[in-house]
Amino acid sequence: MHVIEPSRRPAPGVPGAARQNTLVAIMFFAAGIVFLDRFGITFLFPQIGADLDLDNSRLGSLVSVTAVAWAISSLIFSVLADRLGGGAKWMIVASLVLFSCAVGLIGLAPNYGSLLLLRAVIGFCEGPALPLIQGAVARASSPERRGRNMGIVIAGTLLIGSALAPGIMIGLATALGWRLAFPLVAVPGIAVAVLVAVFMREDGPAAADAHRIRARDFRRVLADRNVPLALAGSTVCIGSSIGFGTFAPAFLHDEGLSRGTSTLVLTVYGLVIAVGSILAPAVSDRIGRRPALLAAAVCSGLVPVCFVLFAHSLPLLLASLAAGLMAGGSLTLITYVVPGESVPRELMATAFALQIAVGETVGGALGPQLGGAVADATGDLGDALLLYGAAPILLALVAVLLRETAPRATGRKAVPEGPPEAGGEVVLP
């Protein structure tokens, strides 16, 4: 008689592979829309800056204010979801609808002040989405698939929000003007919200019987040394990646690359990073989180440097983007996978939101501002990109200091035992 090996036996309450795949597919698109609406504006910075007479520092602040509002909101609503024991589905739906509406209003902004306010509203409405999405995927994933599944969700942010975004945003702005581009890109967010509302359900104990997280339980989030280490790593990773994404399009423009060539480079970069966000976490499922994160940190530093070195050699620049195959996994590993495997399952959303809150508030706010200030002071956006190339040195140090959490590498459960999950498993019918 065939016996299922203990390591392969599905965990109680964890859906089968087909149901996991369906959930991951929906969350792939939901997360992608979040990042398209958040970062799509950066691809139109040359036009917006010229139209509204904005310098690099002010353009950077449009990204920074979104990061700060995102950080505050993500922590508030993720803690609330864990505290109340569920409600992730409707928080995700509300987030998608509200920030999509705010994005649609960007085209009406008459000046810098109104644009800054709308970007803050977008950040506040988007904040809860990704921690709750990743919490749902992490809880519904079997341990040997967790890194891959969470990486696929991040791949959605990169494929849709980075690889496809240049063509979408620049194409719409070229054909209709930048003001009309934003109402059009808001439509997919509403569509995905409907998809989540119709097909996603929360299984588990009835709300009245679900375990309620107590205030003192949140201290357990910081009990493992991996969590504060990950906070430092997330700050560096988020700051450098947001800063690089903010100024890379403008850098290519300043270097004299045509709009078509810049779009090609940014699209290839986004595709490579998207593939890397799946590849590196999947590799970490087998070799461990620490060595995979170390390799990802090194590659993360190489990408901005290659942009500067090979800006005028398209073949070399495209070839050098192969470093993104590991660089793309750094955010998933340090912000989601490692913290998620270091805390009790019912506190995952809070752990993710804490990483986002600190990473966005410090790294997300300072990254674009520091890069913009360096570029304005030296008159060269390449210096800002070199700054983002040096930052991942700190991420590499964090990787060395982390305690290994991968189930295959440690031979034990990835997530510490705790009380019953707050909101049950989030799965599809």
Image: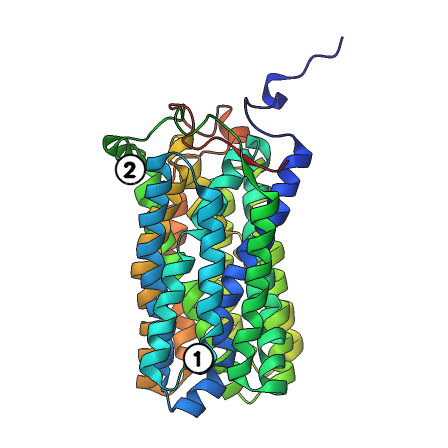
Side of 48 relative to 189 (left or right): left
Where residue 5 sits in the image (x, y, percent)?
64, 17
Report which residue position mark 2 lands on: 222
Q: Looking at the rendering, in which quadrant would you find the C terminus?
A: top right
Seen from the viewer's position, the closer of residues 30 and 5 is 30
Query: Does residue 206 lie above or below 324 as drawn?
Result: above
**Label 1 crowding class (10 Å Cα cut-off): few <14, some 14-19, many 20+?**
many
Q: Does residue 387 lie above or below 294 as drawn?
A: below
- Residue 12 shows in this picture: yes
Q: Residue at x 40, y 85 (%)?
A: 380
Mark 1 to mark 2 CA distance (whole Å)? 38 Å
Q: What is the number of the mark on residue 382?
A: 1
Secondary structure under the numbered disc 1 in the rendered image: helix
**Quadrant in the rendering for residue 192:** bottom right
Residue found 45% across the figure and 85% down from its top: 48
Find numbered disc 2 in the image and state the secondary structure of the residue it sits on: helix
Q: Earlier in the sequence, mark 1 or mark 2?
A: 2
| Dot in front, 1 or 2 | 2
Q: Quadrant of residue 258?
A: bottom right
Give the residue furthest to the right.
1
State the image coordinates of residue 231 (x, y, percent, origin top left): 33, 48
